[in-house]
Image (cartoon, helix red, strand yellow):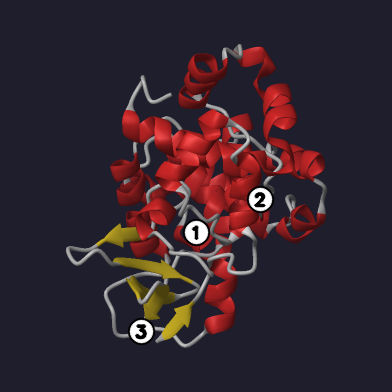
């Protein structure tokens, strides 16, 4: 068991239900069980801290929950925007998880034109088909590119991903044969990293930006889908063609985090949220 103290009250629902991850599931007692780094852990709030049962790897999990980043400082800066201030008050517990890059790529390929329950179901089927079982527990680690390719394209068709199964296989193959180098992508500036991600089959601009934000913590990206277009139109009267310029000017270098607050608040409160 380990404890993580962020200096402010954490909120597991905000962290795990904001759309950035798919392998954490809520429990009746308010805790969440998830799989990362080959471990199954139960996250709960005790004494104002996140307590993780099932691990003693504090270095990994402190990084995973982005413990060193000053979220309070960013939220304070955002308070100058009255709309964003309202959103932050509603879901200010969001933290951008430091997820594995390959897992994030495959997960968001699966997420395209999909809903969260089905995304989760497909990912779990993929892990069960290709991944290694976690010690003494009926959970599976996210598979490596090598494990996915070894299973083969035909068997991937059984996980229920539909047309995405070919994207999953070919993305894994591109990583395995080195035609797309994840280690190099991690070193690249955002624009070059985006261009490399767009080479993956099944990765368009929105998925690429989600990967940049949730797999590389590039807070200077602003993933845009129909939800985000709607909120920027309703809340700020910004047309779709001007969203990225507006986000850069209005929210600055942390606009990816602003997008999460806006998206979560809008999704939770409906069309008249702002």
Which residue, given by chain and number where applicable, does mark 1 sit on?
148
Task: Judge whether 238 appears above or below 190 on screen.
Answer: above
Q: Answer with mark 2 or mark 3, whichever residue precedes in sequence.
A: 3
Task: Judge whether 112 appears above or below 90 on screen.
Answer: above
The residue at the point 58 percent across, 61 percent down is 98
Q: Answer with mark 3 or mark 1, whichever residue precedes in sequence.
A: 3
The residue at the point 38 percent across, 60 percent down is 12
Q: Gap in Å between the C-alphas at discs 1 and 2?
A: 11 Å
Which residue, given by chain and number where applicable, does mark 2 sit on?
174
Identify the element where label 1 is drawn. Answer: helix
The residue at the point 59 percent across, 56 percent down is 72
Within-10-Å neighbours for mark 3: few <14, some 14–19, many 20+: few
Q: In which quarter of the image is residue 129?
A: bottom left
The spot of residue 189 in percent (x, y) is 82, 47
The spot of residue 116 in percent (x, y) is 34, 42
* Quadrant, the C terminus: top left
Q: Gap in Å between the C-alphas at discs 2 and 3?
A: 29 Å
Q: Which of 186 and 2 is in front in this view?
A: 2
């Amino acid at each position: 068991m380990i404890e993580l103290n962020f200096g402010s009250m954490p909120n597991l629902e905000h962290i795990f239900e904001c759309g950035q991850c798919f392998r954490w599931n809520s429990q009746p007692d308010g805790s969440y069980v998830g799989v990362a780094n080959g471990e199954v852990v139960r996250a709960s709030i005790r004494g104002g801290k996140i307590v993780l049962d099932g691990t003693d790897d504090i270095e990994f999990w402190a990084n995973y929950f982005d413990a060193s980043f000053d979220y309070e400082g960013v939220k304070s800066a955002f308070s100058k925007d009255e709309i964003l201030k309202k959103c932050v008050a509603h879901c200010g517990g969001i933290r951008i998880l430091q997820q594995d890059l390959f897992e994030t790529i495959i997960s968001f390929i699966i997420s395209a034109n999909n809903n969260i329950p089905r995304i989760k179901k497909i990912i779990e089927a993929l892990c069960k088909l290709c991944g290694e079982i976690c010690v003494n527990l009926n959970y599976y680690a996210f598979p490596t590119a090598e494990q996915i390719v070894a299973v083969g394209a035909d068997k991937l068709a059984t996980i229920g991903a539909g047309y995405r199964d070919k994207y999953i296989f070919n993305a894994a193959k591109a990583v395995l044969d080195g035609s797309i180098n994840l280690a190099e992508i991690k070193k690249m500036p955002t624009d070059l990293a985006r261009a490399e991600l767009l080479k993956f089959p099944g990765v368009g601009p929105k998925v690429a930006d989600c990967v940049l934000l949730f797999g590389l913590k590039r807070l200077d990206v602003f993933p845009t889908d129909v939800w985000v277009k709607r909120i920027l139109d309703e809340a700020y009267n910004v047309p779709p063609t001007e969203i990225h310029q507006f986000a850069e000017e209005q929210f600055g270098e942390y606009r990816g985090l602003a997008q999460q607050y806006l998206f979560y608040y809008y999704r939770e409160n409906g069309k008249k949220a702002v």
